[in-house]
Image: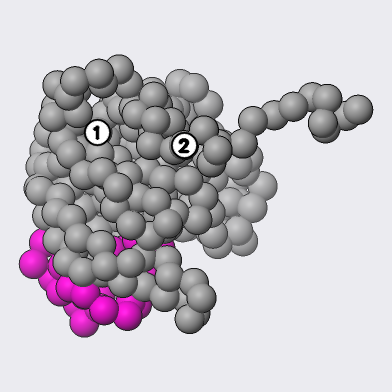
Amino acid sequence: MIEVKGLTKKYSEDITALNNISFRINEGEICGYIGVNGAGKSTTVKILSGGLNFDSGDVSVYGLKLPENEIELKKISGYVPESSALFNSLKVNEYFEFIGDVYNLPADILQKRINYFSSLFDFSQYIKESIGILSKGNRQKVLITSALLHDPKVIFLDEPLNGLDANSIIIFQDVMSKLSQKKKTIFYCSHLLDLIEKISTKIIIIEKGLIKLDKSSEELKNSEDYTNLENLFKGMYSENSVRKFSYEEAFS
């Protein structure tokens, strides 16, 4: 589970990325964490995954308090960052072997999992190719696989679908749903509202470093006048705050 109390993160005196936010995500939940660019999504996931310090508040993941238990957290978590920073000079199988060494996975178990996920996401033919020559989508598949090889308890996802084809997105959704059924806790940052709505059991909306909504998906669906997540999200912004395109102003 994930517990956050009074979390504040400032990048400067003028920039407060997170302003005293609090929330709880229970074991086995898929939390869709939603917001516009600059709302504080990536800052939150970097802090929760142990990759970024914060100014004040309490953060714990499966009882591991941060930042002091950062190393222990990494042992039980998987993280798919927004940008796929991989070792381009390594071959795909070499990178997976490196991940296996980091998590002390027995060679036979590691190979079984590599074979399974490379077949599932359809990149088996690239296993002996250098990561640097792969397409964006295949690099993302490698990144997702590397985050799952050690069967983590908690998974942090920051725009994990970048570059994936439609079939791989459907497979990814199925993977996350079934991992949730196995009591894995998933923190899922994305701007793809329809996909978030399909698999999330909890929705948190953040705006300018503040939590604007924190409800279970079931509670949202039973709310009066609720139609879908996209309309809810749009409705949280005033007409004046949503910019609209004018062809005449742009090109006349």
Q: Amino acid at mark 2?
A: Ser
> SS for tag 1?
loop
Rendered residue at 15%/36% (across/down): 216
Q: How many marks?
A: 2
**Mark 2 to mark 1 CA distance (whole Å):** 26 Å
- Of 55 and 199, nearer the camera is 55
Quarter of the image holding residue 221? top left
Indicate how the structure is coloured in the image. Answer: one colour
Residue 208 visible here: yes
Residues drawn in magenta: 43-71
Magenta region includes residue 50: yes
**Which residue sits at x=31%, y=72%?**
8
Which residue does the numbered mark 1 point to in the structure image? 200
Q: Quadrant of the C terminus?
A: top right
Is residue 102 left or right of 222 when viewed as pictured? right
Q: Quadrant of residue 244?
A: top right
65 left or right, relative to 108? left
The location of residue 139, given as percent across then percent down, is: 54, 45
Q: Going 39% across and 24% down the picture, which residue do you hit?
A: 231
Q: Residue furthest right?
A: 252
Of the image marks 2 and 1, the number of the one nearer the N terminus: 1
- Residue at 15% across / 50% down in the picture? 25
Residue 219, compared with residue 222, is above or below; it is: below
Work out whether residue 69 or residue 11 is closer to the camera in this orientation and state it.
Answer: 11
* Residue to which mark 2 is pinned: 238
Q: Quadrant of the N terminus?
A: bottom left
45 or 85: which is nearer to us? 45
Is residue 9 covered in magenta?
no
In the displayed structure, 228 sits above or below 48; it is above
**Percent position of residue 31, x then y:** 24, 42
In this image, 217 relative to 86: left or right?
A: left
Q: Residues within 10 Å of mark 1 (few under 14, many from 20)?
A: many
